[in-house]
Image (cartoon, grey):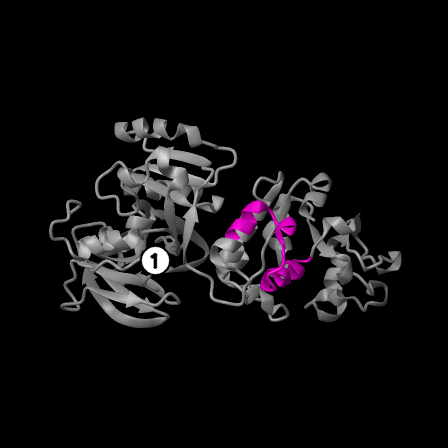
Amino acid sequence: MVEALVPHFDQILVVPCGPRPDKPTTNDVEPWHRAALTDITFRGIPKVEVDLFDLESAAFTTNDVFESRYGHLGELWHVIGSDLSKGGGKEQSPIHLYWERGREMWRTLKFCIMAREGYEVEAADLPPMNQLIRLSPLEFSASSQIRERIFKRLGYAPLVTAEVGAYIERYGLYRGRIPAQRTRWFLEHPRLLIFADERNARAMALAATYRQWEDRENPAGILVLGGDGTMLRAIHEHWRKRIPFIGVNQGHLGFLLNEPDVVPAEAMPQTEFVIRLMPMLYIESEAPDGSRQTDLAFNDAWVERSTSQSAWLEVQVNGQVRIPKLVADGALVCTAAGSTAYARSMGVAPLLADTPGWILAGSNVMSPPGWKSALLSPEADVTLRSVGGEKRPLNAYVGGRSLGPAVSLHARHSRIATVEMVFAAQRDMAEKISAIQFPQGNALL
């Protein structure tokens, strides 16, 4: 359908919807899988942009709201199937009967109608402002048909792109069971986007040995050469490519990367890997002037004092004040992956990669006495708010990047952003974290 629209419009916006009471299938898989499948499906089609705001906010935006959100781009056309316009001449279409403010939208919005097989289009049923595009039967397969074939273990490969099929199989989606978060993976025909630390001579030299597998146009994985900071930069830049990140350590500790001896270039096609699907955090910070900015963090985000005065913070979890006045240098939230980084210096015990939770920690806490950290559920949301006034200003940071002065920071698990982290099967991330917990004789520490 989208490819059929490309010749007719300057830009096509694809907005996967949030939870819908009239379509319970929107909850069949977690929103981050739906976000990934949408990104993968439409990647590379000219003029197409995927906007994931509905999934991130767990909302369902109605068509009239799109006018205010996108109206500044120019003339807006709402794409619908011809089943939704059937009966429009008698004001009996699904839009008239079931859409909130449907009769008004029918009169005032511009509709591009995709004529679907089995729904004959009567001229009298068309909205006042319409554009009709006909699809042949071979050009259209309903997503419900695809999901049904997957559930029944029937062939579905011709109905999706190869990359979408590979993602569905990796995590066992639409099978009627809880999708996997950890899966085995072989890269039999490596196609790599190489992301090397240009300031690291060893990383640049190692990159040359992998050039035989380089494919910047259609990569199947992102090879990251450097340290943990290089991996974080690669994730920040490329996470929406929705392909696995394979790190090779050319830095120091390298908790997010493999050691060079377990992923040599010549052995990559024969190497058995483990993919771990890791969450990212959705961060919103508020500046003293009331402006807000949002960002995503793979490792951590924090607020800290910006003067010699200690920070005074109110700590809320799920809207409930848990610590009315935290007196400390600052406070941090982190994922399991980030628990090996800055949080570790705050005295936090690293979480295993499979831990279904994340961490809130304080830095050099004076009050409450003895408080260091708390383990949070995946559904939790945290707000850190300054109660120190202008005398005790704060700065906010996401993954080491400064967001500038802040009076509050809000954090939760993102509903759209995940990262596929790749480790050699014989020494994946769980083994690295175990090495921290039992450090005797461990050369990394």
On the image, numbered disc 1 is attached to which residue? 409
Task: Count the labels in the image.
Answer: 1
Residue 190 painted magenta: no
In this view of the protein, which residue sits in the foreground, 104 or 198? 198
Where in the figure is residue 117, as x and y percent of width and height? 79, 56
Quarter holding residue 349: bottom left
Q: Which residues are magenta?
A: 142-167
Residue 174 visible in the current orientation: yes
Inspect the magenta stretch and tell me whether residue 148 lies in it.
yes
Residue at image position (20%, 53%) is 435
Q: Residue furthest left?
A: 440
Residue situated furthest front in the rendering: 270
Residue type at mark 1: give it.
Answer: Leu
Say left or right for 54 vs 129: left
Above or below 357: residue 269 = above
- List x then y, in percent, for residue 235: 39, 44
Magenta segment, prevailing SS (helix, strand or loop): helix
